[in-house]
Image: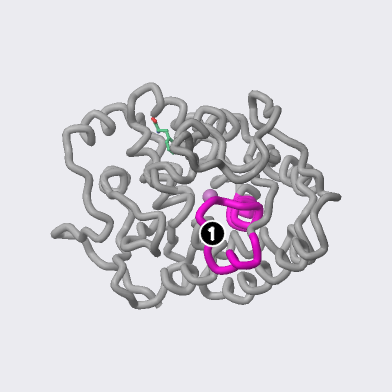
Amino acid sequence: MQNSKQAFFATVAEKSDGASLRGNYSDISEDYVVQQNWDRYTSDEHALWRRLYQRQAELLPGRACDEFIESLNALNAADGIPRFDTTSEALFKATGWRIVAVPGLIPELVFFTHLANRRFPVTVWLRNPDEFDYIVEPDVFHDYFGHVPLLFNPVFADHIQEFGKGGLKAMQLGGLDQLARLYWYTIEFGLVQGKHGLRAYGAGILSSGGELRYCLEPSSSHHIALNVERCMRTLYKIDSYQETYFVIRNFKQLFGDTAPDFTPLYERLKQQQPLPANTLLTGETELVTP
Ligand code: PHE
Ligand code: CO
């Protein structure tokens, strides 16, 4: 994906550079919601899911936050690609969210509108076996395994809805690049300070075998406390592990820090140069990895 800035909610239009989006977008409806067609997954696909799931599950203890592990276990999704309908019902009872099936990446406006209405879009297709370790676009494993468990957490669930509303607002205010960075470094690649050390809560980490190990190793990457404005100034790379991880204390803090009106923030940030992904500013402290 050449246009890396908003890879997570890249628009269909953005792909008019000749590269076609993976997934079937023919006769797509306005909200991009499709049928999961669970019966059409092959036994090879279910087997690949089981392998992906097992590899990740083994890495979770000591690396993923407790809330994620607990919710994931309750989902009983180890045996094959899950039926979205079943999950959606359980999720609705827990936090009032639903999951909806989509063909893959969807336009920003559609993405934010779903989130603002407590609907989480999950891609229907599964990666190919040769993408076991790394995939550029989100597939069903990333979307479901990485994102769905924390939607069972009431505070995090509320946060994602607020993010969706914030996205619609950022589109009006010209703050999308800034908001995209916040999304990247929190919802996708965020770390939280757990009782026993740093833990991952970001979906991009949790669904990646390599990065789930890398992000907590003493490494050349930085681990610093989340500051929303600093985070929104920081560029990110989509084709390598992160050079900086932003750490929160808990989900309440994340909710509280992102609650204020971002309008003045976007205005300030437009006057400033963005920072390279590997920046460490004077006065910033490295948090200790386990
Ligand atoms: N508070 C943000 C705004 O005023 C909205 C938002 C909430 C953005 C949560 C991201 C996460 O735009
Ligand atoms: Co994601």
Q: Which residues are magenta?
A: 128-150
Whether the residue carrying mark 1 lies under 8 Å from ligand 2 is answered with: no
Horizontal relation, residue 3 to residue 107: left or right: left
Front-lying residue, 180 or 153? 180
| Quadrant in the picture for residue 193 | bottom left
Task: Give the residue displayed 39% in from the left and 29% down from the top.
Answer: 170
Report helix, strand or loop for mark 1: loop
* Residue holding disc 1: 135
Front-lying residue, 97 or 120? 120
Query: Furthest residue to the right?
Result: 39
**What is the x, y in percent for residue 6?**
42, 42
Task: Characterize the local packing of mark 1: few (<14), some (14-19) or many (20 or more) Cα atoms within 10 angstroms.
Answer: some
Task: Give the residue displayed 43% in from the left and 72% down from the top.
Answer: 214
Task: Give the residue displayed 72% in from the left and 45% down from the top.
Answer: 91
> Which color scheme did the rendering employ for the protein?
one colour
Question: Magenta stretch: residue 236 in it?
Answer: no
Amino acid type of disc 1?
Answer: Ile
Asked if residue 180 is positioned above or below residue 145 in the image, the reply reads above
Query: Furthest residue to the front?
Result: 18
Asked if residue 222 is positioned above or below residue 104 in the image, the reply reads below
Question: Magenta stretch: residue 143 in it?
Answer: yes
**What is the x, y in percent for residue 92?**
73, 40
